[in-house]
Image: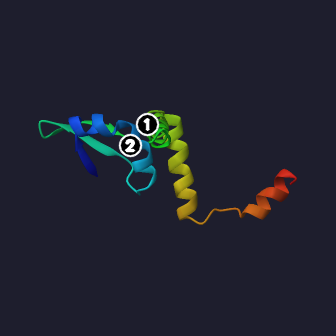
Amino acid sequence: MTQLTITDARKELLNLPKRLAKTRERAIGITQRGRPVLAVMPWEVYESIIETLEVFSDPDMVSALRDSIDDIRKGRLIDHDKVGRRLGF
């Protein structure tokens, strides 16, 4: 992860969205006195992290996720065309 001092981040703030869009990095670390204090990331990454935390904090959703992973591992899958036919598409 790229790291910037808080002073450099302040100078670069308006350029950070473009900078992140041009790279595969998901965030830029901001340091103060050599220690990480902030992370700057695209809004989509932030939303994804929050959604993941919400899923993992809900026992029912975690159970459904585990069941789905078990179905995949055991080959209990339905292809896209079959699903479409079942739904009338």
Q: Nearer the viewer, mark 2 or mark 1?
A: 2
Q: Amino acid at mark 1?
A: Leu
Q: Which residue is mark 1?
A: 53
* Residue indicated by mark 2: 16
Question: Residue drawn 24% across and 44% down?
Answer: 4
Report the coloring of the rendering: rainbow
Q: Earlier in the sequence, mark 2 or mark 1?
A: 2
Disc 1, SS: helix
The residue drawn where x is 46% and y is 51% is: 21
Q: Position of residue 44 (x, y in %)?
A: 50, 42
- Is residue 60 depicted above or below 66 in this figure? above
Q: Where does residue 47 sit, x and y in percent of width and height?
A: 49, 37
Residue 8 percent across, percent down from the top left: 24, 40
Residue 23, horizontal then vertical, whole percent: 41, 56
Bin the neighbour count of mark 2 within 10 Å (Cα to Cα): few under 14, some 14-19, many 20 and up. Answer: some
Amino acid type, mark 2: Leu
Residue at 48% x, 42% y: name it.
48
**Which residue extends farthest front?**
11
**Which sits in the foreground, 84 or 19?**
19
Residue plotted at (52% across, 55% down): 69
